[in-house]
Amino acid sequence: MHHVAEALLALGGAFLVCGLVARAGVPIGLPTIPLFMLAGVLLGPHTPGFVLVGDPADLELVARLGLVFLLFYLGLEFSLAQLTSGGRRLAAAAGVYLCLNIGGGLALGFSLGWGTSEALVVAGIVGISSSAIVTKLLVETRRLGNPETRVILGIIVIEDLFLALYLALLQPVLGGASSVAEAATGIGISFAFLLVLSVVARHGTRWVSALMRTRDEEIVVVLALGLAISTAGAGEHLGVSDAIGAFMIGLILAATPTARRLRQLTHPLRDGFGAIFFFHFGLTIDVGDVLAVLPQILVAAGTTVVLAVVAGIVAARVHGFGRLGAANIGLTVLTRGEFSLVLASLALAAGLDSRLGPFAAGYVLVLAVLGPIAVYSSPRLARGIPRRLLPRDPEPAGRCNGVPLDLDVGTSSLHELGTDLLQVRVLPGSRLHGVYMNELRLPEGATPGLLAREGTTSAVAPHTRLRTGDVLLVFTQPAQRHDTERRILAVHRSGRLAHWLGDTGT
């Protein structure tokens, strides 16, 4: 009973501390992710002074739930068709990113002179992004609706698939697999698990929909969490990241009629438990050990920044994005996290160089602080990318001073661009009130632009909810104009029943 009381006090204190530091930092423009981590460092067992949580293991399960909820919610925001529509271009962008970062990490590992086995581990520590932090950054910066976000998600999904292969290849180094056949078996099982989930996401949604078909919100949440957590656990057991298992279940449920309700109901779980995930991460960091390998950490961080930006430029060129798209891609996938720490702990358990632990912790902390700041500053940092490397970014749209929305854009300019502009006003009594953007199911070629609300304008995302008085701009190809109007009018007439219309587009 005493242990349970201590655990509850620690968990409650962690929630309070995370809330207080976020409340203090957000008004002055600081992102919450590094704030949560730094709170864990300062109040953890490795830092002198008051210790809130003496043993990080006390919060480990709750922290893993935070990771599961972060990736599950991210899956709910997208569909399998959206992530795979890039095909070869998306695979090429992710492949370039992995080659640059794993190759650069391997070169860095050998240059440190800690040994060949250690160099292979350093390559993994340096080469793989943090799915959890990338997810949180996309949500916090409200970039889920950006065109380059699909590329970012494709990169982290392919990275997670690569993890199973890389961990299996490292088994002789880490002492897990006794033979090549055993390692190959592990790889096969991991990919079979992911293949099954992909098939269910594409062809089995009607059975999942039948399971979730109930008006009782309590039952919907319980069933969804059961699916997400059990699939994450099964993935972890089979050698696949628990995060990717939760993400795939989110993708499956995103294609069901309950997707909108699930996003609304699980949003608080994502934010609350996600904060504990990052706080727990800070608890594991020993500042003293980190300072001993600080030069190596700074070199690794600098190398990662350069390689991530180069990879972002390559991905932007492949997909036709400008400098801002390149900066958003490269800087968003800059952060490192859970996999780097797991790999370092496996290396220490295998008896490799003891400096790998503090190196990984310090490296991840530096990028966890630097990454979010860079992401928030990407519009300014994008100006440092040479113009000759990428096509020109589109000119920003005219400003809006209120409703109704008047644009200082001539129709001839839109015509020259081969684009029509639809202005959708949500009038009193319209059933568009309360509808989420992704429920409009706009056809391919139609892109939501700006939303004018109460005298301000903002970009729209899949989770943006329309209200009475809103004015929405939708850019559409001329050939798709009537189909776009038909879909919007159908929602206007039938409200959320329009969720059943058309394909699962954005």
Image: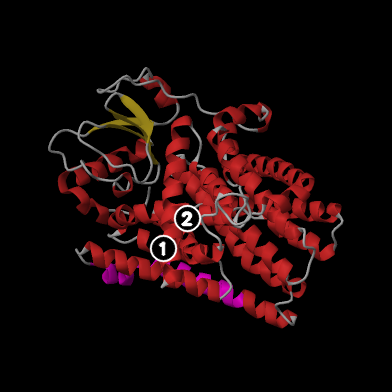
Magenta stretch containing residue 210, yes or no?
Answer: yes
Disc 2 marks a residue whose amino acid type is Ile
Q: x and y percent of residue 428 in the render?
A: 14, 34
Q: x and y percent of residue 75 in the render?
A: 43, 57
Q: Residue at x 52, y 53 (%)?
A: 279
32 vs 485, left or right, is right
Q: x and y percent of residue 61 in the render?
A: 48, 66
Q: Which residues are magenta?
A: 188-213
Q: Quadrant of residue 169?
A: bottom right
Residue of label 1: 8
Residue 228: which disc? none
- Compared with residue 420, is residue 62 higher up or lower down, i.e. above or below? below
Whether residue 87 can be seen here: no
Q: Nearer the viewer, residue 22 or 103?
A: 22
Disc 1 marks a residue whose amino acid type is Leu
Magenta stretch containing residue 454, yes or no?
Answer: no
Q: Residue at x 69, y 68 (%)?
A: 346
**Label 1: few (<14), some or many (≥20) within 10 Å?**
some
Residue of label 2: 276
Which quadrant does the N terminus fall into?
bottom left
Mark 1 vs mark 2, foreground winner is 1
Q: x and y percent of residue 51 in the render?
A: 55, 54
Q: Secondary structure at mark 2?
A: helix
Q: Main secondary structure of the magenta part?
A: helix
Q: Residue at x 70, y 77 (%)?
A: 176
